[in-house]
Structures are given as structure tokens and as C-alpha cells.
Image: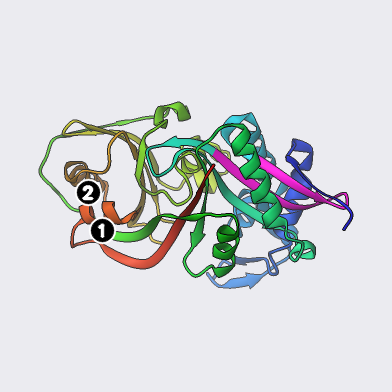
Amino acid sequence: MNSIHMRSAALDDTQAISDLFRTHISIWQRLNPAGKVEDVMYDSLTIYERWLHGGPWMSVETAAIHLSHLLRGAGLPFVVEADGKIAAYAEAYRGTEPEPFDDHVHLAQVMIHPDFESAGLQDVILNDLIEQAKIARLARVTANCIAGDNKAQSLYARHGMKALSRIRRFNLPAKSGQGFYKVVDHHNDNPQQISNWFMPVGRLGSSRQQWETLWPQTWYAISEMRERRTYRLNFSASGQEALIYCQQQLYAPRAVEVYLWSPKPLTTQLLIALRDWTHREGYRNLIMSVNDDTAKVLGTEAEADGYYEDVYGVNI
């Protein structure tokens, strides 16, 4: 391999990045009218059906929208060229949060073409990102690791990264409760609103990554996604302000996934208000991903489902 080079992605790279992601999908499927899974050709799928196989990179139309959003300031998309071909894609997000994260850049996603899986491109990406963070005088570089991903753990260890936090997923019953709170719709998607705020609920990735993925109404052009119940809310309970995004679970319509940003960690009063509001909206369960300290606030009714991610970081 003569040359390896990492650079910022450009809109002209959309097709190549989409092709790269789709090389990892071996079978394309959908539900037929009888509700059974059937194997189909890629070209016969709708844009939404392609999305269900792995998100916006599954079709060039949604890939272009996503990449455009990143290039307009939402995130940092990169490609790695090897021998003149796009061999890898990486996506990162700048953010400022309270410790242990501080001013950081978060490596959110890496995808390597199967032909280059043994070329060490993951190391190239992390080395380059750490160097860029040093130039920008950021405090650290972070990345998440799903439980049991030994390969990612080894990669992070080689670059001096250590576990900073563990995020576990819990199910909590919605419940009518006592307390005064105010809820209003909130459609302002400016990320400056959450600068240096905590993200005590839903931080699977980074706070900025989740904000840019969830809060802008990027995918409302896709009718199936527009029809899924979502809420963008400003909550105020016992003096605590919070911005909360709730989304009906795709395959469990009586459950709602919760993402929460606030100047303070989660309090019991805010949790009571949130459980009461979701109960009034007709939900039975809240899906909440939290660190160990926040899990204590959830109480004994919360049940862990076994899924967790570790957040790794290295100081710059």
C-alpha cells in the first residue's frame, strides 16, 4: 500500500461513502404484506426500508442530506484514502461538557472497507484525530465502546485511552406523580443551548452527537419517520430546567426513549415530572440510558436490560 491519507470529507464523496457502508450489508430484507421477512434486491427497497438497515448512509439520497448537515457545522466527517480509493470513513463531534469530558472531540463512528480491514486504518484515524485535538487545544479525545468489543478496547488502549464512564440502559415504568412542572414545545435546534450542560440521560455517544442526530428535524421529509411520535420539550420542575427529546420506540409503541440535557445532573423532582408527563401521554415505560450515579436517582423500580457502553478518553 503506497499511500494512506486522512482528509475532511466533501459532498462529492457521498456516493463513495454510501457504497462503503453498504458493503457491510450482505442481505437486504423487508416485511411483506403478511408481516414476514423476505429477501429482496436493494433497488426494490424504499428509502425508509434502506434506512432500517443502518441509517442515513444506506442510500445516496439520505447520505447527501446527512453529510451536508455535518459539513454545515454539525460534525466533523473524514475519509481515509488508500491507494487513491476511499477505504474508510470517520465521524466526530466537538463538544463542551462538565467533567469528565470537558472540551473534547468525540469519535462517533468508524467504517472500514472490507478490502482494507487489516491495514490499520483505525489507528490512522485516531492518531490524526488526536493530533487535530492538540492543535485545537482541546482537553481530550473520547470514544464509546459497546460491552464485549475487545477489538475496540485494544485500539483505545494502544492510544492511551482509559474508561471515563459507563452508560447502562434501564426500563422505568411511567407513573402518575405529585409535583409542579411546566412543559412547552421547544424547536430551537441551536447546539449552543447545551454548551457545558450535562447529558444525564441518553448519552450513548456524546452530548453534541445526540443533539445533532435528534433535535434538528432533518428527516421529516421521510413520511414514515415523520409519523413516528417524537417530542422536543423544555421542562421546568422545582427550579431545574431541562431540554428533553422523547421518541416512541419503533417496535414497542407503548415505550418511549428519553434523552435529556440540563445545567444540572438529574434530580428526583425532574424524574417525577418526566414519569408523570409520559404517563399522561399514554406510555407505559421509559427507556433511559444513564451512568452509575444517575442510575441511583432512578430508584428500585428501574430494571437494567443488560446493554451498556463504556466511554473512553485520553487527555491531550
Q: Residue at x 64, y 56 (%)?
A: 50
| Visible residue check, residue 165 | yes
Depth order, front residue of 161/202 = 161
Q: Residues within 10 Å of mark 2 (few under 14, many from 20)?
A: many
Q: Is residue 38 left or right of residue 214?
A: right
Residue 138: x percent and y percent? 53, 35
Give the residue number, with chain letter if any, for mark 2: 275
The residue type indicated by label 1 comes to Leu
Q: Residue at x 74, y 64 (%)?
A: 117
Q: Is residue 89 left or right of residue 249?
A: right
Q: Are marks 1 and 2 in contact (CB under 8 Å)?
A: yes
* Quarter in which the C terminus is drawn: top right
Is 282 within the magenta? no
Dot placed on the residue nearer the N-terminal end, 1 or 2: 1
Q: Is residue 96 above or below residue 35?
A: above
Q: Residues within 10 Å of mark 1 (few under 14, many from 20)?
A: many
Give the farthest residue toward the left: 178
- Label 2 sits on a secondary structure element that is helix
Give the residue number, with chain letter if any, for mark 1: 172
| Visible residue check, residue 189 | no
Which colour scheme appears in the figure?
Answer: rainbow
The residue type indicated by label 2 comes to Arg
Q: Is residue 18 left or right of residue 312?
A: right
Depth order, front residue of 65/82 = 82
Depth order, front residue of 308/245 = 308
Picture quarter containing residue 253? bottom left
The prevailing secondary structure element of the residues shown in magenta is strand
Q: Residue at x 55, y 69 (%)?
A: 150
Find the magenta span and give its range: 77-93
* Quarter in which the N terminus is drawn: bottom right
Depth order, front residue of 157/153 = 157
